[in-house]
Structures are given as C-alpha cells and as structure tokens.
Image (cartoon, rainbow, N blue to C red):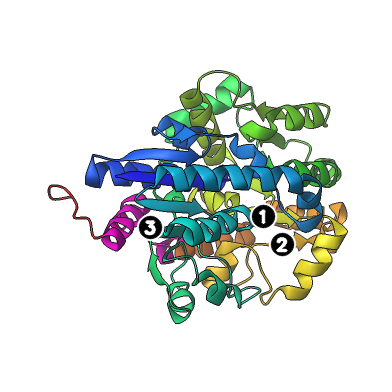
C-alpha cells in the first residue's frame, strides 16, 4: 500500500507519525511518501519539501508567501497524481491540505482522508458541505465532531488524539531534570510561545513583560522554555536575556531522543505554564500542569476570525468540559498585566490549580484516554475505508 501523507506543522507531524506507526502495525506492507516533519521522517516518510514552508497561520501571514505556497501546491498535486497512491492523507493545515485534496480528487480520483476535522462547530459551518465534494473520510479528534461531518455526507470516525497516550516522565526523569538544570526544588513556570514564526514574534515580548510582573511577586520561580525545533534559534535569541536566567530547551542540542526526554521531564516537573493556544494545551493537560493560555495575531486576521467565531473558548479542556477553568487571553486581551494577574492567581491558589486538574482529567477521558491508542484507531479507520483487513489479530 502506498500512502501519500501531508503535515504542515509540529502537531500534524505528531499525528502523522502516530498514524504511520498504526498502519505499519496493522498492515506491515506500507510505503509512505509526502510532506512531514522529523517524527514522520523517523517513521519512514520520504518528505519532498520542508514542512516549515506550510507552517503559516492567519490571512496577513499567508499573503506574502502566497506565490511560493501556490508553487508548492502545484508541485505536490503533480507528485500525487503521478504516484497514484492508494490513499491521500492530509493532516490539519487546511489552507494548504484541502486545496491539495480538491485538486487531486479532480485530476486523479484518489481516495482522500483528512485527519483533524475542521472546526465547523466553531466557525464557518459551511466548510463541511464544501469538503464533502472532495474529501471521502475524516478522522476526528473530538467526540462530537463526527455528527457534523456525516451530516455533510462524509464518513467520519472519532479516533482521539495521540497526545493522550504519550509516555509521561517518571519521578527519576523529573528529578534528573531538576538536578541537571540547577533548578533544584524551586517552582517551575513553563513558558511556550508557539511554533510559528509570527506567533513567536508577537508573544515573546508579551510573555516577557507578564513574567517580569510574576517574578516581582514570586522571585523564587524558575522559568523553563522548551523551544520548538523550527523556532529554536529565534526563541533562544529572544529569551536568553530574560530575567531569572531562564532554562531554554533547545532540541538542536543533542540527539532527538534526548531532546524529547528533556521536554517530557520539563512538562512533568512544571508547577505552572504559560502557553500559546494550540495542541500544547492538551500536552500540558496530560502532564496535569496548571495553565494560562494567551494568543495574539495580526490585527486584520483577528478582526476576521473573531467575527466568524461561534464559540467563546479555544482551549480543548474548556471546550470538552464546557467550563472555562483555564484562563484565556486572546487577541486584544493578550496583555501582560492581565496574563500576570491570572498567573498570580494560579500560583497563589491551590483551589484554582485543583479545579484545573480535575477538568483536565475529565477532558482526557472524553478524548479516549485509557482506551485503544489513537494511532491504532486512526489506522484501523483508514484501512476500513479502503476495505483492507488487519493482519493477524491486531
């Protein structure tokens, strides 16, 4: 079986790698071609372009790169049509991926699977009906999404999110991390300013100002900043001069497995977190790390998106539990003073932290934690759609 897969950002790379592992386990004989990051490449993907070229978000961010994206889109469609894969699996990054799926369906009729249902329940509900013209099958991360997709005429399976089955740091790894960084028993504030260039540029100054306020009140707190590989140089340059001698986890330093272990230990060791919105909020929930979410974007992009939005939260824990227990500061509300107050309340209140911990556990259960691994569920769904039987008793 030949599967052509496309992922455009770190979260998609994680989803793709998990799905690839599941397909290998269930079929054995599968070849992967396409576009992906280091995790997917480690699973055997032959990536034909840097995934980072697709890692754009927001109208104003995409426009300057439109011609290059258009060229890459045409190249990708041509490759897929020539390769004639058994299935095209596009992962999130809808601005690029769904355009590719539409063109491939028009020119070659390849079966198309889109992994991560678009948030039609949040904004632009008409997208589901348009997708049904060229997407055959959707793999959904959230339990309430299949109804929206099926109503539009697509097959849709809830498969959960791979992050819920990721291994967490054990006590020895956490202890080693605290010792090796010199943090000791000091409380840790984990700071995650994003994995896209635009969001990092906007959020780093805001986060720094907010953290300065926090350090004025809680001077013993240590700051730890795990940098996304694509943004490691930018984050290191921007954060190294912050107050409090922040510990920066640069994934370029050392082997990939060592970097992953250190990041996992940092999440496990953290007492609190300040993070950009996105999949990382779910990673923090799995680690039971009390969190404040903040995000900003280009003014023009914010004006459009805020008017189209149909929900009042972007954080999965809040969404799944229908309770706003994790504070969010989005768009114009993304201000240092407000963020610092929320962090101060979290640091100073064990009740606030406990409330988040309970909500995180509830959200993870609804996402399928404790059941079959999402990568296997996703692979099984893809194979069922293709009419392929699993090998052995898998």
Give the main secondary structure of the magenta stretch: helix
Q: Earlier in the sequence, mark 1 or mark 2?
A: 1
Which label belongs to residue 369? Answer: 3
CB-based contact (under 8 Å), mark 3 and mark 2: no
In this view, the residue in front, 254 or 8, is: 8
* Residue density around tag 2, few if under 14, some if 14–19, many if 20 or more, within 10 Å: many
For marks 3 and 2, give the CA distance. Answer: 24 Å
Q: Earlier in the sequence, mark 3 or mark 2?
A: 2
Whole-percent x, y for residue 159 in the image? 38, 61
The verdict on residue 393 being magenta is no
Whole-percent x, y for residue 333 in the image? 83, 62
Whole-percent x, y for residue 194 in the image? 69, 44
Camera-side mark, 3 or 1? 1
| Residue 332 as seen in the image, left or right of residue 82 | right
Residue 3 vs 333, above or below: the answer is: above
CB-based contact (under 8 Å), mark 1 and mark 2: yes
Residue 214, picture quadrant: top right
Camera-side mark, 1 or 2? 1
Q: Which residue is mark 1?
A: 277
Q: Is residue 115 visible?
A: no
Q: Quadrant of the N terminus?
A: top left
Whole-percent x, y for residue 37 in the image? 53, 36
Q: Residue at x 43, y 52 (%)?
A: 88
Q: Residue at x 38, y 57 (%)?
A: 369
Q: Which residue is mark 2?
A: 328
In this view, the residue in front, 284 or 254, is: 254
């Amino acid at each position: 079986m030949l599967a052509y897969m496309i992922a455009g950002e770190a979260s998609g790379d994680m989803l793709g790698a998990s799905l690839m592992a599941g397909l290998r386990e269930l079929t054995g004989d599968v070849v992967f071609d396409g576009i992906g990051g280091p995790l997917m490449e480690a699973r055997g993907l032959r990536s034909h372009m840097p995934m980072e070229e697709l890692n754009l978000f927001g109208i104003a961010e995409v426009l300057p790169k439109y011609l290059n994206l258009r060229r890459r889109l045409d190249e990708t469609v041509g490759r897929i049509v020539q390769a004639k894969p058994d299935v095209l699996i596009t992962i999130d990054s809808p601005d690029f991926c769904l355009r590719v799926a539409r063109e491939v369906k028009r020119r070659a009729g390849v079966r198309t699977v889109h992994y991560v249902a678009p948030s039609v329940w949040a904004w632009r509900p008409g997208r589901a009906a348009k997708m049904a013209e060229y997407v055959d099958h959707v793999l959904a991360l959230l339990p309430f999404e299949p109804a929206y997709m099926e109503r539009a005429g697509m097959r849709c399976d809830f498969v959960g999110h791979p992050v819920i089955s990721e291994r967490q740091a054990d006590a020895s790894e956490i202890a080693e991390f605290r010792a090796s960084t010199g943090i000791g028993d000091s409380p840790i504030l984990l700071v995650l300013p994003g994995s896209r260039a635009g969001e990092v540029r906007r959020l780093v100054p805001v986060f720094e100002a907010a953290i300065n306020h926090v350090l004025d009140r809680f001077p013993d707190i240590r700051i730890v900043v795990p940098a996304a590989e694509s943004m490691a140089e930018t984050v290191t340059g921007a954060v190294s001069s912050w107050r409090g001698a922040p510990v920066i986890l640069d994934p370029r330093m050392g082997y990939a497995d060592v970097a992953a272990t250190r990041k996992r230990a940092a999440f496990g060791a953290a007492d609190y977190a300040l993070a950009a919105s996105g999949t990382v909020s779910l990673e923090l929930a799995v680690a039971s790390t009390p969190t404040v979410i903040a995000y900003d974007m280009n003014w023009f992009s914010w004006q459009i998106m805020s008017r189209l939005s149909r929900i009042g939260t972007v954080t999965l824990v809040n969404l799944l539990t229908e309770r706003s227990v994790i504070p969010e500061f989005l768009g114009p509300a993304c201000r240092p003073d407000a963020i610092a107050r929320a962090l101060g309340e979290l640091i100073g209140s064990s009740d606030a932290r406990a409330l988040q911990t309970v909500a995180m556990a509830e959200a993870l259960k609804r996402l399928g934690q404790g059941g079959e691994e999402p990568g296997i569920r996703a692979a099984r769904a893809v194979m069922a759609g293709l009419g392929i039987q699993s090998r052995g008793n898998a």
